[in-house]
Image (cartoon, rainbow, N blue to C red):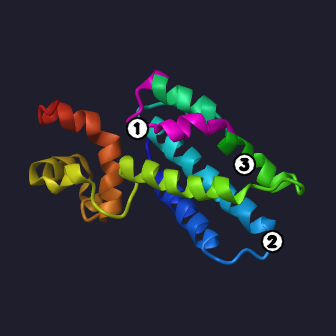
Amino acid sequence: MCDIRLFKSAFMDYQAAVALYQRPFPDEMFLNITAYHLQQCVEKTIKGALECVGVTVPNTHRITKLLQMVTHNGANLVISEWLDDHAEMLSEWEAQTRYNMDFVVEKRKLDRAVTEIDKFLKQNGVAEDLREELTKLEVKEKLLSYLPEENRGCTDFEMNCYYLMFEKRLKTDLKII
């Protein structure tokens, strides 16, 4: 079952990573913790999108496996070239940064990852600012009509997440190609 809490959690992981990254690093552990939160952000975003198309997501942290599932199941997610090319690196960050005390993430890789994951989130509407599609009143009203009454007073972030859930239905109902 699709649940926007995965997208919220992913966004919070990204915000935590950025907050850590912007602090002076007392040691390499800060880099590793930042990398872990970036990996979690990507993993949760992908799993959220898969759940939104009815896929039962396996218990895995392998970004490459999850990306294959996106492709094979038509999940509503745009996968950037950077993400596709660095899926193995992100997967490695999940376990190595937590369990291998000799593992150190390179700062230059984090520099790029912070930027690219921010683009990935924004491109997929996992952002606080309302996505462009929802600035059209007809689209926003139609999306709200799909939601239970108690969910209609949602934030822009939540609207963006609901859009991810219902994009295909919206395009069909509104006859948008």
Residue 101 place in picture, x, y as percent: 89, 57
Mark 2 against mark 1, which lies toward the viewer?
Answer: 2
Q: Do the residues under discs 1 and 3 have CB atoms within 8 angstroms?
A: no
Q: What segment is highlighted magenta in the picture?
A: 72-88
The secondary element bearing badge 3 is classed as: helix
Which mark lies nearer to you, 2 or 3? 2
**Quarter of the image where one finds residue 23:** bottom right
The part of the image, by quadrant, that contains residue 26 is: bottom right
Name the residue that disc number 3 marks.
93
Kindly identify which residue carries mark 2.
Answer: 27
Query: Which tag, 2 or 3, sits closer to the chain's start?
Result: 2
In-front residue for pair 19/59: 19
Answer few, some or many: residues within 10 Å of disc 1's Cα (few below 14, many 20 plus, some between 14 and 19): some
Residue 59 in view in this figure: no
Image coords of residue 12 (percent x, y) = 53, 63
| Sequence-first disc among 2 and 1 | 2
In whole angstroms, how far apart are the C-alphas of marks 2 and 1? 35 Å
Residue 47 position, x and y percent, is: 53, 41
* Three-letter code for the amino acid on which mark 2 is drawn: Asp
Q: Nearer the viewer, residue 142 or 79?
A: 79
Q: Secondary structure at mark 1?
A: loop
